[in-house]
Image (cartoon, rainbow, N blue to C red):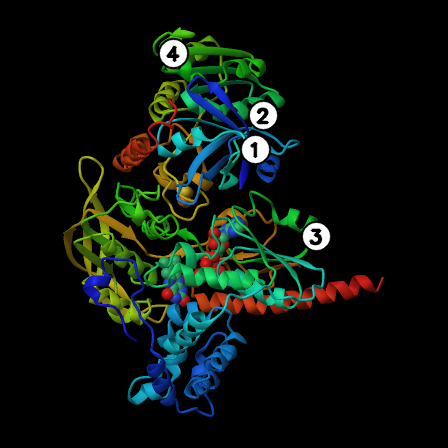
């Protein structure tokens, strides 16, 4: 059992949980994730570790309500417990001294970038953060990012915060302004694909963090397989970060849609069951 | 052994084999010739005194029979159900030459189940501890056996298990209809009653490293992490939607109970026409599971003949009774997808058997003829290999082949204090051989700790 110590909103539509998990906290490196299961009947879902405090023995998880499990997770309060959390899983991000780095975050994916930002700054590096979202309510931790980043640029699709438009436009300007040594992009698949396509002609190394369907998250089932450089790789143990210029995004999008009908069914059933209790 | 009606059972997840009645068991036991030089014992990887336990059954002393087995084997209710007896004990039985060998597996299951049906709940066993801590990584049959044996010798045992439930393949791989989960739970409770602690969600190599375990005061570590990583065929179309590795398909159903979706949150695709590729237990389990999820047609696609199938005899017989069709001497070469990226067919080569290969089996070669089968789901069950998570985290550990741990026959690795056994040192094998390895390693660990303790106490 893992106790929730604190709950708040990282953005109006993004929940943040601080959870007691001392062993995971003390072994966490930027880029790692956990797999959690809320209760006996729950599914196992991967969530990136957005922050950790090894002295306090806590990890922070960020998520947006997109399906049954995240809806249910959002209903938990400080003091409640999560039945299973395993981690930290996945490879750590390649942290070293690059020079001028750009981190591009889309929606909830930005959470993954926060520990990477802190680690890159420690090297040290110059780090420019570009955060994008559909609207202001989904922009994750803009203040926390700007505390560490050399520059934080915001974009929203509807113009409700920062610049109106996509992250790729801003990224292009940053790259054209002066040499970029690495881009790390995390967010919706379409956004990571667009970023990779944008940086390719500029020959800027681009790392993306993939989010395929996972089951146990320890390399035993192959649910999470992705094609990178024409080879099958297991994202949970060989990733989740890969070279964006080599990822087969088309296949990833296809595989991510495989359980859409079941996901919708589970969510609809959950919402009809907990009518009154389900907070929006 | 009695089994449930194939038509009914192939649509639910309740146990297929019904076991023997008391009268049947005694009658079967009476057939035993009580050989002076019992070949059955030679065939048993843990050398149970089989004639002695059968003699007890003959005398209606069922708990006595069970006690004999327990001297050698902690998990009789499990082994009686899932050991490949035809290649082991029953394969050696002299009666098998002329007629049927003694149903040793069924008798083993009978005494274990008989006890369960009549037993009171067990209270914790008090053992004088010797104060030495030993860590066991992985809670499959190898780890559980090593844990139980060491706990009985007085060691303070902690099992670290990556998943949210203990049992290894017994829990996440083998389906309920072949090995009911309550049997595994009961055996694990028995082991916990010996004082063994089990920490779940604990991935060694990630949550903690082997070095850290030594620093925490563990005197020795046994690695029994299995061979959990699925092998792929490297044919086009393997990543299409609705192509599963058997491990994922079975984990969804067995561990996550996806057959009960949406009451349980994890889904699994229920498909109409299913092709399972492979000829081992994993293939049989996948095919029979697909049938129980409501498939209309399930094929097992295997590149050799039924004689070469590595699965237990009973499994392929049960599969055939459940209307699963075997496509033998057939090798898939491509999985074909539709415009949406979903499986629609597999293209296969027809094979012929040629010269014998290193495994002693005749090697299949392409006949030149090919054909296509229309299916909407493909499950690949062509084998498992070593999982790198733990193995790669231990610096300097000697490995062989595809990343298996090199050990001597008692499970010693090249690093003092680190022992290993089961599928992670042999490659995918059997439950009983994993248990045998756990047992031998327990003895070696005991000897190692006593030796190092006496060395340090001399100073
Ligand atoms: C579907 C299927 C059906 C089978 N049917 C039969 C049968 O009928 N008869 C038979 O004899 N054999 C059968 N087998 C083979 C048999 O199950 C295995 O040989 C046996 O389970 C191996 O035991 P083990 O203890 O070595 O490993 P496993 O049972 O694989 O257990 C290993 C455990 O270690 C855990 N682990 C892995 N990595 C870590 C880590 N880093 N930290 C902590 N824990 C970790 C895993 O989660 C797992 O629980 C079958 C196998 C499968 C997959
Ligand atoms: S999630 Fe199972 S192998 Fe990656």
Badge 2: few (under 14), some or many (20 or more) residues near its Cα, within 10 Å?
some
Could you tell me if residue B409 is visible in this image? no
Residue labelled with disc 2: A119
* Quadrant for the C terminus of chain B in the image: bottom right
Q: Secondary structure at mark 1?
A: loop
Residue labelled with disc 3: B217
> Ligand 1 near label 3 (Cβ, under 8 Å)?
no
Residue labelled with disc 1: A29
Residue B144 in the image, given as x and y percentages of width and height: 53, 62
Residue labelled with disc 4: A156
Q: Secondary structure at mark 2?
A: helix
Q: Secondary structure at mark 4?
A: strand
- Whole-angstrom CA distance, mark 4 to mark 3, is 53 Å
**Closer-to-camera residue (A136/B120):** B120
Q: Are marks 2 and 1 on the same chain?
A: yes
Residue A75 in the image, given as x and y percentages of width and height: 43, 29
């Amino acid at each position: 059992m893992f106790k929730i110590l604190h709950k708040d909103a990282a953005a109006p539509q993004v929940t943040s949980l601080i959870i007691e998990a001392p062993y995971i906290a003390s072994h966490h490196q930027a880029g790692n994730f956990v797999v959690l299961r809320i209760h006996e009947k729950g599914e196992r879902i991967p969530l990136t570790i957005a922050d950790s405090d090894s002295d306090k023995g806590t990890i922070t998880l960020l998520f947006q309500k997109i399906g049954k499990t995240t809806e249910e997770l959002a209903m938990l309060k400080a003091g409640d417990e999560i039945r299973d959390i395993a981690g930290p899983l996945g490879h750590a991000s390649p942290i070293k001294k690059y020079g001028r780095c750009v981190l591009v975050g889309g929606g909830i994916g930005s959470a993954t970038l926060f520990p990477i930002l802190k680690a890159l700054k420690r090297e040290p590096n110059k780090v420019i953060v570009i955060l994008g979202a559909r609207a202001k309510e989904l922009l994750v931790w803009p203040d926390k990012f700007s505390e560490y980043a050399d520059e934080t640029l915001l974009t929203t699709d509807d113009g409700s915060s920062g610049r109106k438009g996509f992250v790729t436009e801003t990224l292009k300007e940053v790259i054209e302004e002066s040499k970029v040594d690495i881009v790390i992009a995390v967010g919706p698949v379409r956004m990571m694909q667009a970023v990779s396509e944008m940086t390719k002609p500029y020959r800027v190394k681009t790392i993306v963090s993939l989010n395929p369907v996972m089951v146990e998250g320890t390399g035993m089932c192959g649910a999470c397989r992705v094609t990178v450089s024409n080879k099958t790789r297991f994202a949970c143990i060989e990733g989740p970060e890969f070279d964006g210029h080599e990822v087969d995004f088309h296949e990833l999008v296809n595989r991510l849609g495989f359980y859409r009908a079941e996901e919708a069914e589970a969510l609809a059933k959950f919402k009809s069951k907990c009518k009154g209790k389900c907070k929006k | 052994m009695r089994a449930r009606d194939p038509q009914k059972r192939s649509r639910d997840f309740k146990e297929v084999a019904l076991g023997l009645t008391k009268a049947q068991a005694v009658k079967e036991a009476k057939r035993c010739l009580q050989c002076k030089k019992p070949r059955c014992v030679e065939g048993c990887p843990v050398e149970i005194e089989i004639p002695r336990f059968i003699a007890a059954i003959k005398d209606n002393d069922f708990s006595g029979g069970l006690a004999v087995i327990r001297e050698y084997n902690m998990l009789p209710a499990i082994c009686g159900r899932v050991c490949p007896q035809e290649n082991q004990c029953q394969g050696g039985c002299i009666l098998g030459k002329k007629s049927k060998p003694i149903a040793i597996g069924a008798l083993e299951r009978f005494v274990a189940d008989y006890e369960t049906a009549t037993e009171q709940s067990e209270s914790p066993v008090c053992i004088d501890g010797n104060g030495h801590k030993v860590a066991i990584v992985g809670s499959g049959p190898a780890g559980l056996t090593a844990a139980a044996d060491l706990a009985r010798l007085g060691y303070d045992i902690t099992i670290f298990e990556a998943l949210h439930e203990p049992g290894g393949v017994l829990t996440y791989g083998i389906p309920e209809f072949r090995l009911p989960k309550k049997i595994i739970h009961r055996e694990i409770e028995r082991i916990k009653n010996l004082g063994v602690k089990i920490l779940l969600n604990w991935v060694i190599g990630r949550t903690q490293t082997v070095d850290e375990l030594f620093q925490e005061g563990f005197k020795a570590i046994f690695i029994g992490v299995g061979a959990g990583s699925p092998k792929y065929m490297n044919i086009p179309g393997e990543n299409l939607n609705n192509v599963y590795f058997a491990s994922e398909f079975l984990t969804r159903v067995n561990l996550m109970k996806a057959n009960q979706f949406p009451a349980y949150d994890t889904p699994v695709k229920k498909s109409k026409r299913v092709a399972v590729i492979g000829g081992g237990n994993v293939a049989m389990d996948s095919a029979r599971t697909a049938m129980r999820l409501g498939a209309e047609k399930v094929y097992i696609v295997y590149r050799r003949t039924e004689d070469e199938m590595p699965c237990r005899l009973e499994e392929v017989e049960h599969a055939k009774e459940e209307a699963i069709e075997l496509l033998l001497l057939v090798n898939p070469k491509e999985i074909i997808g539709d415009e949406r990226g979903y499986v629609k067919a597999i293209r296969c080569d027809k094979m012929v058997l040629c010269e014998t290969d290193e495994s002693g089996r005749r090697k299949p070669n392409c006949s030149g003829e090919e054909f296509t089968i229309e299916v909407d789901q493909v499950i690949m069950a062509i084998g498992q290999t070593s999982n790198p998570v733990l193995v790669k985290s231990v610096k300097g550990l000697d490995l062989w082949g595809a990343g298996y741990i090199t050990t001597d026959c008692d499970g010693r690795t090249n690093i003092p204090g680190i022992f290993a056994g089961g599928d992670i040192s042999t490659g995918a094998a059997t439950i009983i051989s994993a248990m045998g390895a756990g047992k031998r390693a327990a003895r070696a660990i005991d000897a190692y700790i006593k030796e190092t303790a006496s060395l340090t106490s001399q100073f």
